[in-house]
Image (cartoon, coloured by chain):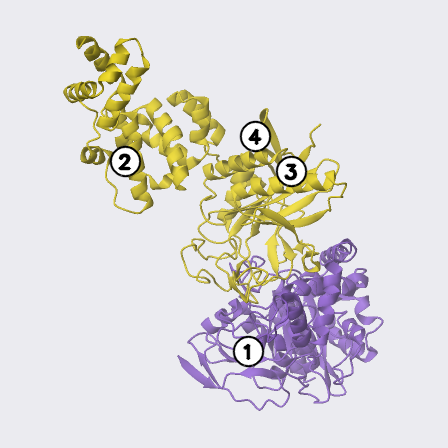
Amino acid sequence: MEMISFNPHDTCNAFITTQIQAPFKEGALSGVPIAIKDNICTAGIETTCGSAILKGYIPPYDAHVITLLKDAGAAIVGKTNMDEFGMGTTTESSAFGPTTNPHDPSRVPGGSSGGSAAAVASGMVPYALGTDTGGSIRCPASFCGITGLKPTYGRVSRFGLIAYANSLEQIGPMAQDVSGVSRIFSVIAGHDTHDATSVNHPYTHNPDPEKINGMRIGVPDEFFGDGVDPAVSTVVKEALDVFASKGAELIPFTMPSMRFSLAAYYVICTSEASSNLARFDGIRYGPAIDTKNRWHDAFSKYRHDYFGKEVRRRIMLGTFALSSGYYGRYYQKAQAAKRMVREDFARIFTDVDIIAGPTMPTVAYKLGEKNDPLQMYLSDILTVPANLAGVPALSVPCGHIEKMPVGLQIMGKPFDDETVIDAAYAYEQEVAKNGR
Amino acid sequence: MADEIIIGLEIHCQLNTASKLFCGCSTDFRDDAPNTHTCPICLGLPGTMPMLNKKAIEFALLVAKALHCEVLDECEFARKNYFYPDLNKAYQITQYDKPLAEGGNLIIEGDNGERKIRITRIHLEEDPGRSVHMGSQDRARYTLVDYNRSGIPLIEIVTEPDLRSPKEARRFLNKMRATLEYLNVFDSEAEGSLRVDANISIKGSNRVEVKNISSYKGVEKALLFEITRQKNAIRRGLKVERETRHFLETRGVTTSSRSKEEENDYRYFPEPDLLPLRVKSWIDAIELPELPDARRERFIKQYACSVEHAKTLTGSIRIAEFFEKVASIDHTLASTWTADYLLGELNYRGMSIDVVPPDIFRDLLSHLKNESITDKSGVEVMRIILDKIAHKEPIETPTACITRLGLGKTGEGEITGMVKDVLDENQSAVQDYRTGKNEALNYLVGQVMKKCRGRADPAQLNRLLIELLAKKE
């Protein structure tokens, strides 16, 4: 087995763990360094989810995507910083300190896959894996000016991804450009018997810039409405014009289910999280409990001491939403809303091939700017619909506002990640050609 | 009027699949060290996901079909959330509002004829790990956790409150055990393979749930205790509290577990890592084996067993299979000797019929059939052999045992000699007989039997005694 050396000058705190010597095998990605978000299990390498409660936890097994990457020859060079358990939009809630934006150290890189985005954007690695529960790949891709794909739900195995919200999240590639995303996606997509929700739908596509000609692109009014920075709207609309110039047809429409998306999303993700994170009771992972307290008192105190504030907030929200007497009012209603979002997408996709709009309502915030949780939750408004619907969604850089990158979001039909990638590639190629 | 007793049971049975419910770990862990049958999945390590064992579904469907349940078009797994050290994910994957099957029944022998006990539902779930308290549960210095059991497939069978006495509950459980064994989905002899929760009330009073009953005898004991407790409370004008109680097997009592920590809100929700199951159509392809009632009827017809013998012999598949291996020697002898003698001796020694080699028993039955030994000698040989098995000593065949101990039935010559000796030694009894005291004959028979250690054929002995007594006159 060969090794590559990896000793990056990590000025933005993108990594929690690095492998100074990273082994690799022969394969299509021989010796290609790749950074992995720290909620994806890597055998023998500490995996923390950005949380103090998992400090020192070394998984005995590789996530399925890690096995696939290693088999393809990639070198796992490090584990990237993230909002604790993926719960955030800024990477500030990590127990390992915030990651900063490579474009401006006073700003956040977005989140929760902020470390992966910063590692790619700063050039420390060409590729990274992120995970996306409500926008956690696309938001930091947008804020850091790189490309990131949240694949169709089921297209990439989640086995080995430390779950935050199982029914919403996917592992996806992050790269400098669309070809890079496509390259990594072709390695990690496909069926896995260890994940009952995974689907046998491998990705063997080469991005084709000509497919944009004649493509019908839905443009949702809601993505350019209240809460979206007009400057962002302007930049994204110019990007849509590029599509039109290449022969695509822009079709405005409305998405009534957008009204419920955010509420449904936060009920579902906090409910699932409250159950997923319950196993961290101090017995099996993380710093050992040092107490003679009774069991209930001991684990309650442990969870208070080692989970961060945002994680505790979401666990409590989810616990409440699932409680007897409230289940019907919250969880079931959220599931109904999720179905409406799905139906909305299905309806729209009878008429259009892809949907396009901004990824985030703004450019990257200043560190500490989003200290009101509700304000932070609202910033997910444009990304959560794709998670609720399970459809593929990608963010590709489409310009800047005062040097800060803006992301164009492209969503597609379920299992038609290929068309999303074709559209993004067409845009990227056209912009490169015109030196924009 | 006697108080009406209302009992419903929740029975948890481990299915004897080769691997666990959600991973490939072996279920055959009982002789092995703690935590040796585990993997990242059944340890509930972060990031792992359940993979459903198809065999477990098939086993559960067999049970559903045998109990005449309706399999739901779509069933679903759910998470039952609670904190406990042996529950490594802090939730148990079980089924909640969409179980595998609903609405069946099992027919048992009631106090007055047959009774149909309704089954509410059957669902599949995973067993948690096992806490091993070092010391008593209340005063343990520390607790260890063994995850070998974690992920063993369980079915939970819930009955309607149709049982009317502890004895009926016991009979129901025995019938259920037999049925599950006939289906070959359950090993009743594996330690901890069955756990029962019982709901019990006296009509008009509150219902009490008794948890943690882990043996067949325990169910009857726990219910008897609880009925007495509830009746006493009512008699003294107290209210029976609606509560959950725990059965302490060692002390035979139930205790209240009213601590706050046990008041759980399980926050059930559908398991997002498993898809809903649509297996209703599988049921047609599932063939039921012969079940206890059918086998009982067959034994009556095929082997001319008495009804009582047929019930005993089919009450457990192990006994039924054993009987069929030895029956060809002689149907009547085989059923009498298995049902009346062998099972009694085994029961007395706390042994399972599995340890008795059928060939050994066939040999014994052959001697009895040829009348080369007496019944009394037959029992003696059986006891000697069972004791050797119990002490794990090498066993001899009945033929060898009979020869070694000289237990073969006495010949006419040998017995005649012994009768003569006895008559010489017991002149007063001989006189009594001759003066018409018939009891004296019994005494003389006894004396001869004593001399030959029971090897004489009773009919032959009687005949010889009467003949010789007549001659000597």
Label 2, residues with CA under 10 Å away: few <14, some 14-19, many ≥20: some
Residue B346: % across, % down = 38, 38
Q: Is residue A331 above or below residue B206?
A: below
Pick the quarter of the image with the C terminus of chain B: top left
- First-in-chain label (4 vs 2): 4
Q: Kindly check if marks 1 and 2 are in contact, taking CB atoms under 8 A apart as contact.
A: no
Kindly indicate which chain is depicted in yellow in the rendered structure: B
Same subunit, labels 3 and 4: the answer reads yes
Between A224 and B230, the one nearer to me in the picture: B230
Between A288 and B218, the one nearer to me in the picture: B218
Q: Which circle marks residue B360 in the picture?
A: 2
Label 2 vs label 3: CA separation? 43 Å
Which mark lies nearer to you, 1 or 2? 2
Q: Which circle marks residue B7 in the picture?
A: 3
Q: Which circle marks residue A7 in the picture?
A: none
Between B149 and B163, the one nearer to me in the picture: B163
Label 4 vs label 1: CA separation? 57 Å
Amino acid at dot 4: Ile
Residue B457: % across, % down = 25, 21
Amino acid at dot 3: Ile
Amino acid at dot 1: Gly
Q: Which residue is mark 1?
A: A56
Q: Which residue is mark 4?
A: B107
Chain at tag 1:
A
Residue ID at (50%, 70%): A62
Chain at tag 4:
B
Give the structural element (helix, strand or loop) at label 3: strand
Q: Is residue B201 above or below residue A334?
A: above
Q: Colour of chain A?
A: purple
